[in-house]
Image (cartoon, rainbow, N blue to C red):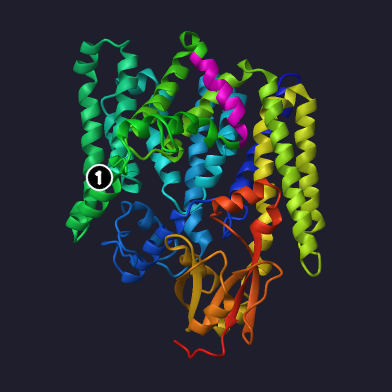
Amino acid sequence: MHGISPRWCTLLYGAAMLLAVFVYFFGLDGQHIPKNGDENVYAHITRLTAASGHWLPLQSELDGMRNTKPPALFWQGIASTGHGRSWTLWDLRYPNVIYTLLTAAMVFLLGWKCARSLPGGFVAALAYLAFFSTYRYGRPFLTNAPETFWLFLPFFLLLYRKETAFASNRLPLLLGVAIGIGLLYKSFALLLPVGLGLSWWYLHQRDYRLGDFIRQDLWKLLVVALISLALFGLWFLLDPDPAAVWQEFVMKENAGKFDPAGASYLSKLLWGSSSVWTMILGLPLNAGLLALPVAALMAAALRHRRQLSADEKLLWIWLLAMVIVFSLPSQRSSRYVLAAMPALAVLCALGWERLGRGWFLATLLLCELALVFIAYLSWRLQGATPDGTLYSALYWLLLLLAGGFATAAMLLPALTRPGASIAALLVFVSAAAFLRPFDSARGSFSIEAQRQVAGKTVWVPSDFNASYEAYRFLLPAANIQSYREKRDQDPDELARRYALFTVRVPLGGHACAGCKVIAERLDLRGRHSSAEISAILHGKVFENIFLKELLVESPGVGAR
């Protein structure tokens, strides 16, 4: 922050880091935090495995979704919930937030060291935490947060200690253990991009003298590979049904990703929603509100690649290794390069001062627009509630202060670049505050309703794999069964089939004739159809996002 004294600069950055920590824990127990549908599948496997009383084999009631991932995440969930005795979203998720913050700490240290300044560390850490991909995948009960930590750790150790680390004969043992733990969270296939990245780094340090690399470094990489694969192999050794692990995980979950699903491999590589461009554009898209300066950073690095520092070259090599390897399977997703996002955050700290201020002004403007959109939805939703008291004065003050900060960052040049990441974090916390009513009393079934259905079968809607698992947090004592949700769901049809059920209807909708509404809650519609997305883009936002869910007792059906 040019023009601000070092003391005030440190205080401001310190306050921003405290804000970031708060943002990542705020609303962590909510049903509606940004996440991925796989969280319900993983929670399902964790719950049933914990109930079995054994760590292996993994348990599931879903067809073909038992050994969908290695056991480390499920073991983590079993431990954090006390073997399922404290079955809450908070207990499932908080270890992943800790992983994310530990990764941010590594990013901070690397930014500090590589930029040779304390503000460089703050810029790197704040950028990483302000990436939407970090916020979306670094908090829920998913594999991404631990996977990113363990796979970035080897590159952190090598770059932080540089010559000493590259020359060490002991470090490969530690690198192998770290990578092996990462593989136990996600897949043995991650050894390919990590192995390519490490090999490229060691070769780069040898100035591409292949003979020196083979004589002095190749054995280190072999040690890393052997140790990491040996750790991953413990799954096969400990699981009482290794044949199922091989068939379900190795052949279906991993080898299946090379199936072009009818299209030719080349056509799918070059265009479409799963093309190589998905991987290349995935880096700025993962950055979310920071996409524009990140895209500008990538373009600048390509133009001035010969002028990059040694640290920048190594970090770009790791990013390229991830993009190259994950472009090989037929299934491609920007989610596959999440483990490289910490390196991108460090590159932000090293390169953002070289970018034009306009990129950050555009980012701040996007943040302002996001805040205006959140305020509009809040106003419409509050007006649709009977008492009109959905949001407190403190909430509106938060929106005002967030917008005021973004405006100040646009007007004060010294605040513009660092303010972009802080403004993105303020958008995150504003969105989380907007969602709190959906996860508080208004968004939950009452305690009395939960008691009333305890021990009874309640049929709930499901529109994705194991999405009904979320109802075990909403109705924890009920026997949850699911029916296939339709957009034009008819409550009367459900009433003829089920004695107790929940149904999602528009805010002004009603239950079936003659049915008893035990409780109701506010909810949001997810997984929109193409028609609904088109309607939203044409201005029908409110009608296609908000709804209410009714817990209904049908008098015409006997208990089941």
In x, y percent, where is residue 480?
46, 75
Q: Nearer the viewer, residue 366 or 541?
A: 541
Residue 301 part of the magenta segment: yes
User: As displayed, is residue 264 above or below residue 414?
Assistant: below
Is residue 109 visible to us here?
A: no
In x, y percent, where is residue 468?
47, 67
Provide the secondary structure element on which disc 1 rests.
helix
> Hey, what amino acid is under mark 1?
Leu
Quadrant in which the N terminus is drawn = top right
Q: Tell me the magenta residue range.
A: 289-302
User: How would you rate the neighbour count of disc 1 (Cα within 10 Å): few for under 14, some for 14-19, many for 20 or more?
Assistant: many
Is residue 456 visible to us here?
A: yes
| Count of all numbered marks drawn on residues in the image | 1
Quadrant in which the C terminus is drawn = bottom left
Q: Which residue is mark 1?
A: 231
Q: Quadrant of residue 254?
A: top left
In x, y percent, where is residue 114?
51, 20
Say which residue appears at 33% left-offset and 59% top-offset.
65
Asked if residue 93 lies left or right of residue 152, the reply is right
Q: Nearer the viewer, residue 308 or 516?
A: 516
In x, y percent, where is residue 263?
33, 39
Q: Quadrant of residue 13?
A: top right
Say which residue appears at 75% left-offset and 59% top-offset.
381
User: As displayed, is residue 263 above or below residue 10?
Assistant: below
Asked if residue 176 lies left or right of residue 304, the reply is left
Q: Quadrant of residue 55?
A: bottom left
Residue 1 part of the magenta segment: no
Q: Main secondary structure of the magenta part?
A: helix
